[in-house]
Image (cartoon, rainbow, N blue to C red):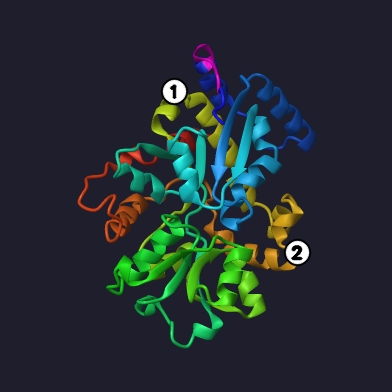
Amino acid sequence: MQRTIATLGLVATIVLAACGGATNNAGTSPTASTAASASAAATLAPASLTIMVGGLNKQIYLPNKLTEALGYFKDQNLTVNLIDEPSGKDATSALIAGEVEGSSGSYDHTIDVAGLGKNLVEVVQLLRAPGEAEMVATAKAGELKGPADFKGRKLGVTSIGSGTHGLTQYLASTKGIAPDQFTPIAVGAGDTFIAAIKQGTIDAGMTTEPTISRLLKSGDAKVLIDLRTPELTRAALGGDYPFISIYMRADWVAQNKGVVQRVVNAYVKTLKWIQTHSPAEIADKLPADYYANDKDLYLSALTGSMPMYSPDGKMPAGAPDFILKVLQTYNNNVKGKTIDLTKTWTNEYVDAAK
């Protein structure tokens, strides 16, 4: 799945063109803006890349499909192939293996693999909160009331090693429960997660929207711990935990700065678009199958989750340090190791985005 991005002889041209971008000037008409964008895109060297996404139809990954739907990749003369992969962990593995140029998953994966000597760098932050919730089966809600009750339980996660698995381990650790004192079970999201709750395969589990709202509507589960907004996340975890982002191999970024800038330009434009449009307007840009046959429920879930989207794509101040602290409580890849956090993220491209 490797893609040829651009020849070295065009890198300088790409960098200069990226700084120009397809910016809409205040006061111009939509038609004029579209024409200007098309004209600007024509001056950029065509580039292609593949980004693997840890679950395209999850609302936490919405900026990926929305950027494509709004035509913002095209505005940057980019052909971006979005590949759907159920878990951010697997997307990270594909990135390290060189199968794709970018991954959309939880930022904490870059810290995790840094402990193994792998250098991935986050280039734009899409979420400023996990957008997840620990859901407890209604039948178990009377006895499982918080992380202190995780011991001996079967807890659902997207996949082993995923961001949901990590957060579950941290929540358990806050009550002195070690990772080997509960059983994590990979159940994915959507229908597979719901089936696991209904069938008793798991007692509780961490998932995202619209799965959360589907379970609440059916009455099969209740919210145990809510991480869907920055405020709720701080209350539950003790600090900011920015989650879904776009990250790439550091060596690839260094060799393709112009293309990276254009990718970030597209995502930042989408994040700003989200801030100025309603959940209904956002949902109308997405494929109908994202609604799981219930658009009203999808809209309700999206309305409640809007605060999780980053308004500007920047890494929140102090967040990497907090996330490292969290990982060091349970993650053997980083325990006792010195991690240079400055190599795991950058605001360079977001600051330069047009």
Depth-wise, is mark 2 or mark 1 nearer the camera?
Answer: 2
**Residue at screen point 52% across, 73% down:** 201
**Residue 127 location (% of width, % of height):** 51, 53
**Residue at screen point 39% across, 41% down:** 345
Amino acid identity at mark 2: Asn
Instruction: Give the magenta range.
Output: 5-10
- Residue 339 or residue 331, whichever sits in front: 331
Visible residue check, residue 23:
no
**Labelled disc at residue 38:** none
How many C-alpha atoms fall within 10 Å of the one at disc 2: few (<14), some, or many (≥20)?
few
- As drawn, is 42 to the left or to the right of 139? right
How many C-alpha atoms fall within 10 Å of the one at disc 1: few (<14), some, or many (≥20)?
few
**Labelled disc at residue 255:** 1
**Residue at screen point 27% across, 54% down:** 332
**Residue 263 location (% of width, % of height):** 56, 34
**Residue 237 location (% of width, % of height):** 37, 66
**Labelled disc at residue 293:** 2
* The magenta stretch spans residue 8: yes
